[in-house]
Image (cartoon, grey):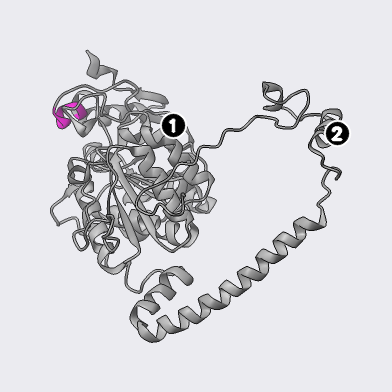
Amino acid sequence: EAKACTDKPTLIKVKTVIGYGSPNKADSHDAHGAPLGPDEATATRENLGWKYGEFEVPPSVYDVFKAHAAEGAKKQEEWKALWAKYQEKEPELAAQFQRSVLNRELPDGWVEALPKATPEDKGKATRLHSQDCLNALANVMPELIGGSADLAPSNMTLMKCTGDFLKGSYEGRNMRFGIREFGMGAVCNAVSLHKTGLVPYCATFTIFSDYMRNAIRLSALAQCGSIFVTTHDSIAVGEDGPTHQPIETIPSLRMIPDLTVIRPADCNETAGAYKVAVERSKLQSMPTFLAFTRQALPNLPNSSIENVAKGAYSVVECDDPELVLIATGSEVSLCCDAAKELSGKKVRVVSMPSWELFRAQPAEYRDSLLPKAVPKMSVEAAVTMGWQEWADAHVGINVFGASAPGGTCMDKFGFNVPNVVACAERCLKGETGVLSDGSQGKH
């Protein structure tokens, strides 16, 4: 009946008895979390009429599997014949299928399609740079498919070159997931695990990634090439207030093994983030979490697609620095401005879009960028937990945000040039630990 129903899903409900066949432990919790034990196992085999011992596989089982193997060989030959006919009839589509599905290769020129910018170009929100990247990739990567949890106009994740993926319209690549982040993440994981060469992405606000947290975790555990696109990544969200302002979200996601988290600071870093994410999805079947801003940011000196792959690099360089300021995302340009105000001091500003990518670099590179003997201060609009790995002193926000314009929130919670400069001077004098935790914004 289930196979006959082709216009809707079918749920088959099967009632079972836990520990079925066990004379003394069936239908009890005793059969759930512990072995039956040798005596009960023997009694169960006798009760079920199973005459074989532990790990003994009867010949009939081998016969069944051998029959399946023969049937599989037959289907393989049928597939080869069908594939040969398709190559003759549709050579262009067959070549695309060969590249994307069979060879699992990315198309020529896909990296060159990503947008680039110079410091002279007008800045904009990284969510808008993300939109540019997705649409540039959509034109050259027919395997890119995804959508948003009913937030596409805010996440900027709609692919303009294609329609919606719907019943009867399977050529579309925009997926309308609805307000169900966990289901959305699980679908993307499944699309990746299907191993058909598709590159799936899904999108929501950074704070709402909590709703699909288990799907994100499982993407790393199960090695899924899901790309999690999130926007509105800090207290700069503004008036929506602390319920929508991620404070602990990004630092907590960095704790998930094998998940790469990237928080870009401008156009080039956003393009670099997508290069990493697409390669991890298509070539490695591993997940990436991207966090983008709502507010506009300037384009940085020395930023590039290539530098993102390093995880961290200098945007303001100097020889023999007296102080290193380390930041991610929207706080990188803030540190650049603060460095200009630290007159007479040799300050290096480091953008660290991804801890995971930087951690994978050779020790020589890591030590040269962040010299052990030089005081280092992190600046990020998030909780300071974890920054002790890279910096001696920290500017962050260890309190919930507030409902106010985004710029006002950033200023009141300490993400302004005077506060960063004051904390940097304290760091230069030897102070360590959390120098600014955002609590001033509560008074």
* Residue 210, quarter of picture: top left
**Earlier along the polypeptide chain: callout 2 or callout 1?**
2
Give the secondary structure at mark 1. loop
Q: Which residue lies under the disc numbered 1?
A: 392
User: Which of 284/17 is in front?
Assistant: 17
Crowding near pointer 1: few (<14 within 10 Å), some, many (20+)? some
Crowding near pointer 2: few (<14 within 10 Å), some, many (20+)? some
Q: What's drawn in magenta, residue-wise?
A: 405-410
Q: Position of residue 41 (x, y in %)?
A: 82, 33
Whether residue 130 appears in this view of the structure is yes
Left or right of 240? Residue 345 is right
Whether residue 230 appears in this view of the structure is no
Q: Position of residue 375 (x, y in %)?
A: 42, 35
Residue at the far bottom: name it.
Answer: 88
The residue at the point 28 percent across, 64 percent down is 171
Q: Which residue lies under the disc numbered 2?
A: 42
The residue at the point 28 percent across, 37 percent down is 179
Identity, as a three-letter code, of the amino acid under mark 1: Asp
Q: Position of residue 23 (x, y in %)?
A: 78, 26
Secondary structure predominantly adopted by residues drawn in magenta: helix
Identity, as a three-letter code, of the amino acid under mark 2: Thr
